Image (cartoon, coloured by chain):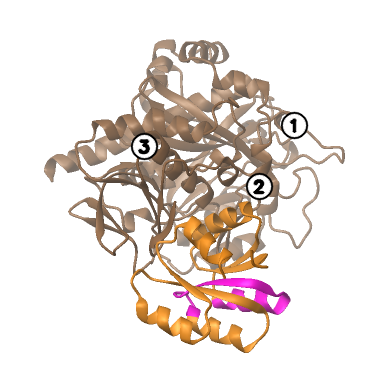
Amino acid sequence: MKLSISSNVHLVEPGDFEPADHWYPRALNSQIHPLVAAFLNLNHEQMAARFCRLNPRADHETVMKLLKYQPKYFRWSGTDLMHVTNNQGLRKLTLIETNSCPSGQKSMPLLDFSFEHGGYRRLIEKTFKPMVEKHPEEGALAVIYDKNPMENVGYAATIAEVFGQNVYLAQYKLGDKDAPVEFRDGKMFVRGEKEEWVEIKAAFRYVTQEPWTRIPKHSKTLLLNPIEACLAGGRNKEVASEAYDRFNEEFESKGISIFTPKTYRNVPYGELQSYFEKMGGSMVIKVPDSNAGQGVYTVVNQKEMDFALAELAHDPDEVFIIQELIHSNYTEGKDPADTWYHLGTIPDSKGRSFAFDLRMMMHATEDGMRPLAIYSRKSGFPLNQPLPEDMNSWEVYGTNLSIKGDDGWTYADERLILFDVRNFALLGLGIDELIRGFIQSIMAVYAIDQNAIHTFDKEASIV
Amino acid sequence: MNMIKNILIVEDDVVFCKLLTRFLTKNSYTTKDAQSAKQAFELLKEQTFDLAILDYRLPDDNGLSILESIKEGDKVSKVILITRYGDQEVANKAIDLGADAYVSKPINPDELLNVIQNL
């Protein structure tokens, strides 16, 4: 490894992969739960058969087609799901969002101890490498990122290992006036050792903060993922929600659908208060292109509504997504038949049960879609205790670990729940939920990828 | 073998700090890192260091002015300044101000280790 070959660029060499640098210590020392390992080893036929057994209306052939789907733009993705129930005790996984630069490798126990690079290598070997081999452009390989150095150094080291060549690791931050990455005529360049610009053939991209401000559409440099995956819904909740609705219309006759909390789109700032009243005094407000829990407001009383209105007042022309809140317990619902509640974690010895989400990272291989990494994050305050007056409801419902500080991003990793022998049982999940979560996640990927194809392929043919 | 044991790394690139920290830790050094001059001075209020590795370019100051401050006090025994590739002028200034050595980017960790061991 050569550090700082230019400002914010390092050169990663084959042999630089160090497991302790790319996993949280407790993940590195954990052992995967046997149920999770069994799920990860299921083949597509087994998953489809079980899914159809659980969902008798689902069409087996359609489910198999989804599992074998080859996304054009969205080949690596992560979904956030929540485990919910209603007054009939009907348990479901509801889709909260789909992410085009998902974290997760550093929290995933190894599936096979003899496979040192774990999911990093599976993603690079089974997804990135086949794409690069088919890409005709010339140039070097790179990883560009603006967050999550632990995983991105791991990806760079794995690419160096798998391809047997050095990899440029470049930080590409929003607002950097002297950024080490440039696009010229759609081709990416990274600043090299002697301040020269090095042409890049293919790059692994983990740029999350408004990436469309600096990454062009129709890039000649191969990107995993290209910006089209973000614009079509991988980083915009509004567009994603429209894509899910289209999917549900298209596949209604096949007995499958993407299940999300009830959603209202394009809500102007001036109508937020009336929605709050219409929805019975609780809801979730989302800024469409927000991520990492920023720009998401859980609102359960007028005080929180006033806070959200004040925070969002800076751009009165912005439109928002409103979603029904997944409630903390059965008695809070306004219409029990149409209201969903968190199942929450198995109560601990103090009787506390916490809301949690499920992050499902997956990738497209030549054989179809495969799960790659899974973990959960729990909220900070239990579902089944009264919320102290001075506490925000985000503490009960918010599960995101990312915390934005003055000097960058940190993670509240004490709320991370690994899928290992010690922790997985806390969630009350089984293989059936993992299969349901995975197949629903593929539906979301399909919906967003198809949206990208319809939107950008037409545009490319005009260009 | 010199008596350097604990090292302060002052560099605004978090990845650089993490990677160099990992490398130096494996080589039996203890490290603290700061991503700005302000953070560096806060650390220097709390403890002493056998060595400071200072990047020249920082968001709120530059390595030379930290070097000057360090040399006025007694919190750090030795200083290595990191300069940009080919920036001999800054390297000369650093030596004039009392730096014990300078290294130019890109940093090869093994070469840096060699410099540290020969201070």
The residue identified by callout 1 is A422
Q: Is residue A335 visible?
A: no
The CA distance from mark 3 to mark 2 is 45 Å
For chain B, the rendered hue is: orange
Q: Which label belongs to residue A184?
A: none
Disc 3 marks which amino acid?
Gly
Query: Dot 2: within a 10 Å radius of its alpha carbon, few (fewer than 14), some, or many (20 or more) residues?
Result: many
**Mark 1 vs mark 2: in front:** 1
Q: Have a look at marks 3 and 2 and say if they share a chain.
A: yes
Task: Identify the residue under disc 3.
Answer: A164
Q: What is the C-alpha distance between the residues marked 1 and 3?
A: 37 Å
Colour of chain A, in one word, is: brown
Helix, strand or loop at disc 1? loop
* Mark 3 secondary-structure assignment: loop
Q: Earlier in the sequence, mark 1 or mark 2?
A: 2
Mark 1 / mark 3, whichever is N-terminal? 3
Q: What residue range appears in magenta?
A: B37-63
Q: Nearer the viewer, residue A207 or B32?
A: B32
Amino acid beneath label 2: Tyr
The answer to whether A373 appears left or right of A164 in the picture is right
- Residue B69's x, y, as percent? 58, 86
Is A417 left, or right, of A313 in this rendering? right
* Residue A349 location (% of width, % of height): 87, 37
Residue at image location 28% in from the left, 46% down from the top: A140
**Crowd band around label 1 with a 10 angstrom C-alpha radius: few (<14), some (14–19), many (20+):** few
Callout 3: residue from which chain? A
Residue beneath disc 2: A397
Residue placed at 32% from the left, 29% from the top? Answer: A130
